[in-house]
Amino acid sequence: MKTLNIGLVGSGFMGKSHSMAYNLLPQVFDPLPAYPRLRILGDITEDLAKKGAKNFGFEDYAVGFEEVVNHPDVDIIDITAPNHAHKEIAVAAAKAGKHIYCEKPLAVTLEDAKAMLDAAEAAGVKTLVGFNYLKTPATLYAKQLIDEGKLGDIWHFRGYFHQDILADPNLPFSWRFEKKIAGSGALGDLGAHIIAIAQNLVSDIDKVSALTKTFIKERPQASGGTGYSSTADLNAPKKTVENDDAVHMLTRFKNGATGTIESSRITQGRKVYLAYEINGSNGSIRFEHERMNELKVYFSDDPEGTKGFRTIITGAEHPFYGSFWPVAGCGLGFGDMKTIEIYQLLDAVANGKDLKPDFRDGYKVSQVIEAALKSAEEERWVEVASV
């Protein structure tokens, strides 16, 4: 079996998620297209890099990303560092001829996303963006139904991603609230996933009209930790939040469909409420990630008296589920989406297959984000192609 050596940059929440998936992969898929060897992990300090390498199973560690990118053994660079670091790492990886797996959003700015896309395409390397919610068996099956024409012409899309993870105003200021590091707030962090789903299942978005708002305008400085694990000193000076807590967006799709997209990081009572509904001329589908092993479907040609949404419990008949469990109802979880994502990455690199969503798809999502920010600022409809 071919071995593909992995160089991971970043040992935070997503670095842990990716590493768990690499380690689980040989237990799920048989045969594997290639075996992932966890070769080296890089982070901003020696303590973080050394601890991450030990905990996640990497053979070696490095401070920074340069040694990881230029390591002669490494085949794939996996980027889970904060958003502002994506461009520099990805461009360097492309120039070094490495395949690239990058968390979303692709970059802080559209200009940076374009630079990443251009560098990867010039180098001819495989790329993957971590829109992992596209990889649930239910959503993969939804795409299959749409592509087979089971819903007819697609008319409407409604998508949501709401969380209350940052709803407490006493949660400290972190890089997620700073424009130069995170870019947009709820729009880029959560809304990017819904945009990716919409463009994957319906068509590219043509125009947007968006409203953004920051409700919690200041937060206390952090006293320790990073990201979601940071802690606050409530007596510390406050820092101004620089990006959006929530976004609401009207969308027009290139195939003629209309839609709405919402995301919020301060919606009380919502945990990982990623949901969408798609209506077509012959039927509809509904999905909620908090019940990620279910897909609700409605078909207009069902017999009278039996019409209504039915619940499909995903099982071995649906994409990738059978590699995990042989029967419906056992259920998959968040990390399993990453395992599917990484299986496709290794298969594409080892066997020259197409890989989606790639940097071009990620760039298209960044275009929609940029158009939405422009729309919110100027209070008007914006064509995505114009940004």
Image: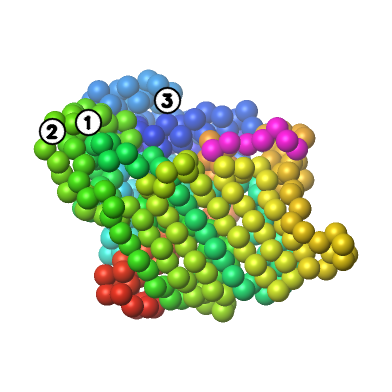
Residue at image coords 24%, 43%: 175
**Alpha carbon of mark 2 to alpha carbon of mark 1: how far?**
8 Å
Quadrant of the rendered structure where residue 350 is?
top right
Whether residue 10 appears in magenta in the rendering, the answer is no
Can residue 279 be seen here? The reply is yes
Q: Is residue 371 left or right of residue 26?
A: left
* Residue 298 x %, y %: 74, 61
**Element type at marker 2?**
loop
Disc 2: which residue: 236
Residue position for label 1:
232
Residue bearing mark 3 = 56
Residue stretch in magenta? 328-334
Residue 368, by quadrant, is bottom left
Please tell me whether mark 1 or mark 3 is closer to you in this view: 1
| Disc 1 residue type (three-letter) | Ala
Residue in front for this viewpoint, 79 or 218: 218
Say whether disc 3 or disc 2 marks the residue closer to the N-terminus: 3
Q: Few, some or many C-alpha atoms within 10 Å of disc 3 (few <14, some 14-19, many ≥20)? A: some
Which residue sits at x=27%, y=75%? Answer: 378
Residue 36: percent from left, percent from top: 51, 34
Q: Position of residue 133 (x, y in %)?
A: 53, 49
The quadrant where residue 57 appears: top left
Q: Three-letter amino acid code at disc 3?
A: Phe
